[in-house]
Image (cartoon, helix red, strand yellow):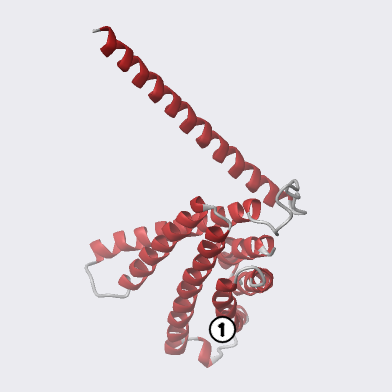
Amino acid sequence: MGFGYLTIGYLIAFLLYLTVQALGVGSLAFLLGYLLMFYGLMSLCRYESAFSTAKWFLLPMMLGALYLLLADVSNLFLLGIPFVSGTVREVANWILFALEVIFQFALLYGIRMISDSVGIKKQSFAAVRNTIFVGIYALLYISQSLSMADSVKVYVVIFTNIFNLVWIACNLLLLLGCTKNICREGDEEITPRRSRFEWVNRMGDAYERTHNKLNESARADGEAFMRRRQEKKRNKKKK
C-alpha cells in the first residue's frame, strides 16, 4: 500500500539523519528520506485522500533539503556561498521547521483517518497522542529562541531533545503497526510478507513480541482481578 516505503523514508529522514549529520551531510538523509516518503504517500493516497496534504508538503521540504545540501557542500569545501549562511540560513531553518511540523500533523491525520476507516481504534488513538507529542516538541523548540535565564534554558533544551526522540520513536512504531495491520482489501488473510531489509524485519518482530507480551500481561491481570472479585463474592455469601 505504501506504508513500507513511508516507514523506511521516515526512518532515514528523522532518525538516521541524526547519525549522518555528524558527518556533515545530513541533508542527503533528508533528501533520500523525503523521496521515499513521497513515493509511499503517492500509493497511500489511492486508498485514503487524507494523505494528500502530507504528500504535497513534501515538495517544499525537498527544496529545503536541496538548500541544506548546498549549505553542506559549501561548508565541506569552504566555498563561502553567501545565501547559505547568516540571516538567510536562519530564516530558512525556521521555514523548514514549520514545514516539518505541519507535515507531521498532516501525516498523523492521514494515519488516524485510515485507521478509523479500517476499525483499528488503537492506532487512531496513537496518532492523536503522537500529534500532541509533536505539538509539545514544537512549543519547546520555539521557546528556545526566547529570552530566558541560562539555568532555565538548559532544561528547556534537554526537554526539547527528549521530546524530539519521543515523537520520532512513537511515529516509527505507529508506522510499523500500520505496515503490519493495514493492507489492501482482499489481502486480510494473507500472511504478512517479509521485507527485503532484514533490519525492518527485526524491528517488526521486536514490536510484535512487545505487543504480545503486553497483551498477555493485561489478560493475566484481568483474569486475576476477576478471580479476586469472585472470591470476595463467595466470602460475602458465606458470611
Q: In percent of the image, x 33 and y 12: which residue is there?
A: 234
Specify the quadrant that holds the C terminus. top left
Camera-side residue: 88 or 135? 135
Q: Is residue 16 above or below residue 195?
A: below
Quick one: which residue is furthest to the top in this view? 238
Q: Secondary structure at mark 1?
A: helix
Amino acid type of the residue tagged 1 in the rendering = Pro
Q: In percent of the image, x 56 and y 90: which residue is there?
A: 81
* Residue 123 image point, x, y percent: 51, 54
Question: Which quadrant holds residue 183?
Answer: bottom right
Residue located beneath label 1 in the image:
60
Q: Is residue 40 above or below residue 193?
A: below
**Residues packed near mark 1 inside 10 Å, few (<14), some (14 to 19) or many (20 plus):** some
Question: Which quadrant holds residue 101?
Answer: bottom left
**Apparent side of residue 204 relative to residue 102 in the rendered image (left or right):** right
Q: In percent of the image, x 45 and y 76: which residue is there?
A: 97
The answer to whether residue 136 of the structure is visible from this angle is yes
Specify the quadrant that holds the N terminus. bottom right
Q: In percent of the image, x 60 and y 64: which residue is there?
A: 10
* Residue 175 image point, x, y percent: 58, 57
Quick one: which residue is furthest to the bottom in this view? 82
Question: Which quadrant holds residue 3?
Answer: bottom right
**Apparent side of residue 42 relative to residue 144 in the rendered image (left or right):** right
* Residue 106 image point, x, y percent: 50, 72
